Amino acid sequence: MDRSSNREHRDNQDRRASGKRGPDILEWKWQFEAKSKKDLAWHDVGTWVNFKYSGTRELEVLVRYAGYDKVDEEWVNVKNEMRERSIPLEPSQCHKVKDGDLAVCLQERDHYALYFDARVVRIQRRQHDATDCKCIFTVRFLHDNSEEEIDWKKVYYRPTQEESVVDHNTPEPTKEPKRPKQEESVGCHSPPEPTKEPSLSDIENLWP
């Protein structure tokens, strides 16, 4: 199944889904991403088709990923394989990503280009304007333990810093020394903005 760069192929139309659904599902579906068991990558949820409870009474949802067809539908565990959607990093927002953070980053290989959980190992902060970030992000992909240097275009930051379900060796975040105000550059050292706490329990409330 080829899902290369699927975040660039988000559906613009609601598809009619079969099965029992909550009344607000069409409003909720665009806010989440799900981890596929087939490629271990995160994909935007396009349509929630159906739901069921597993033998351990955990909620599972049949999802159709944004930009893909019925053949690619997959059952995912709401607790472990679904979460609030990651946010694409903008050049003026690189201050939102810090050493030790969990992020979702694009890994490109000859036969795929997919988004995986990654731990930010270090960031080479560079002065730049608000239109093009010059910082270099060294990240460790958690599914294969490989490290790469990437630019801001391949980084999606998490709304909150929850633990990855596959990260069992989380490093302590490195504190950055304070810099004189005159050395600050646009987008690199601005104070972080408060983030909204996601609540996956709200998903379960969509169904009786």
Image (cartoon, rainbow, N blue to C red):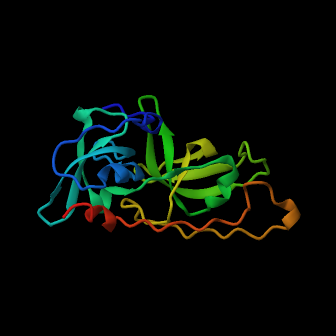
Q: Dividing the image into 4 quarters, which one contains the C terminus?
A: bottom left
Relative image position of residue 60 (x, y in whole percent): 21, 56
Q: Nearer the viewer, residue 208 or 76?
A: 208
Quadrant occupied by the N terminus:
top left
* Residue situated in front as seen by the camera: 86 or 19: 19
Q: Is residue 134 left or right of residue 60?
A: right
Farthest residue toward the front? 23
Residue at the top extreme?
Answer: 110
Q: In this view, does 45 lie above or below 100?
A: above
Locate residue 71 relative to residue 84 in the image: left or right.
left
- View extreme (left): residue: 55
Which percent across, then down, holds residue 77?
25, 57
Q: Residue at position x 36%, y 61% from top?
A: 165
Residue 194: image quadrant is: bottom right
Instruction: Name the image quarter holding residue 10.
Output: top left
Residue 112: image location, x then y, percent: 42, 33
Return the residue found at the far right: 182
Residue situated in front as seen by the camera: 147 or 78: 78
**Left or right for 183, reference 207:** right
Point out residue 189 in the picture as x, y percentages from the top left corner.
74, 61
Depicted 81 relative to depicted 43: above or below:
below
Specify whether 51 is left or right of 136: left
Residue, x 66% and y 70% (percent of image)? 175
Residue at image position (61%, 62%) is 99
In this rendering, the answer to whether 59 lies above or below 88 is below
Residue at 34 percent across and 47 percent down: it is 40
Q: What is the total number of numbered labels drawn onto the structure image?
A: 0
